[in-house]
Amino acid sequence: MSGPPLHGYFGISEVLAQLRADFPDVSVSKIRFLETEGLLTPARSPSGYRRFCAADVDRLRYILAAQRDHYLPLRVIRERLARLETDPAEYRGAAEPAVHQDPASYPGDGIQPGQLLSRRELVEAAGLTDALLTELETFGLLRRIGRQYAPEALQVARMAMALTAYGVEARHLRAVRAAAERETTMIESLVAPIQRQRGAGARDLAARTAGELAELVLGLHAALVDGALAEAGLVQGPVGEAPVGQSDSGRAARGVAGASA
């Protein structure tokens, strides 16, 4: 039997009801995981049930938005939360972490666009553990160029890290890698005739065409996933929209390449 409710506090089901309009994928297990990672410390009722105050809900909104919209690793979210600790009311104005950015880069990581990364730089910038990085390499999600990693490896690593919050392991991502490789092979075969041309602009034309094809392929892929999930009754609206900053065809081409980097 539960103890008396704490005044001004919400149970976990009430918190889910408040958040699900903006974050339909949020779950009890997700909230519990964030608590075990030290990002959230709800109060407890005398009988041990979690009780959340309004500041806890605002903190959850901030964390979920940072993960969904910016693919930020928990380490970076934890650092940002620490800077907000002095004024919890700021969470209400900080549900979106500052400025929309390319998921492959955010302030403070010191990584420049196009920069090759050492193992240590990739681990620190993506918030990975050495063990997870090794697993991502083992299952072909990440590949080195000599002793370094391509710039796209950072986005792959961050997304893989974010997926671990849902129990996804590197071995589960082999199907994603295989699909990306098949899509990339198809695009390469389609632009091969252009690459064989000897004209001065053939290389640029091949790159533009590859980008346009990648955008179409990614859009088709997202639509197929949307449709399959809708048929299964798991979504109420589109889930495959491109992240902010990735609408141009050049980014789309890099997205396909990054998934198989």
Image: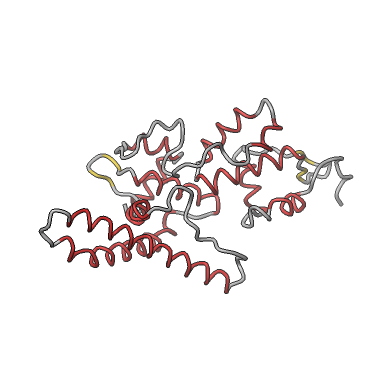
State the residue in front, 157 or 130: 157
Which residue appears farthest toward the top when viewing the image? 86
- Identify the residue at image location x=56%, y=38%: 97
Q: Position of residue 41 (x, y in %)?
A: 69, 37
Q: Position of residue 160 (x, y in %)?
A: 45, 50
- Identify the residue at image location x=87%, y=46%: 3
State the residue in front, 90 or 51: 90
Which residue appears farthest toward the left when viewing the image? 198
Which residue appears farthest toward the right when viewing the image? 4
Numbered marks: total: 0
Tell me: residue 57, above or below residue 172: above
Tell me: residue 196, above or below residue 121: below
Q: Position of residue 16 (x, y in %)?
A: 71, 53
Residue 19 relative to residue 3: left or right = left
Residue 203 relative to residue 252: left or right = left
Q: How is the image coloured?
A: secondary structure
Q: Quadrant of residue 54?
A: top right
- Identify the residue at image location x=66%, y=43%: 60
Which residue appears farthest toward the front when viewing the image? 200
Residue 35 relative to residue 118: left or right = right
Residue 139 relative to residue 9: left or right = left
Tell me: residue 178, above or below residue 204: below
- Identify the residue at image location x=50%, y=46%: 71
Q: Position of residue 65 (x, y in %)?
A: 59, 45
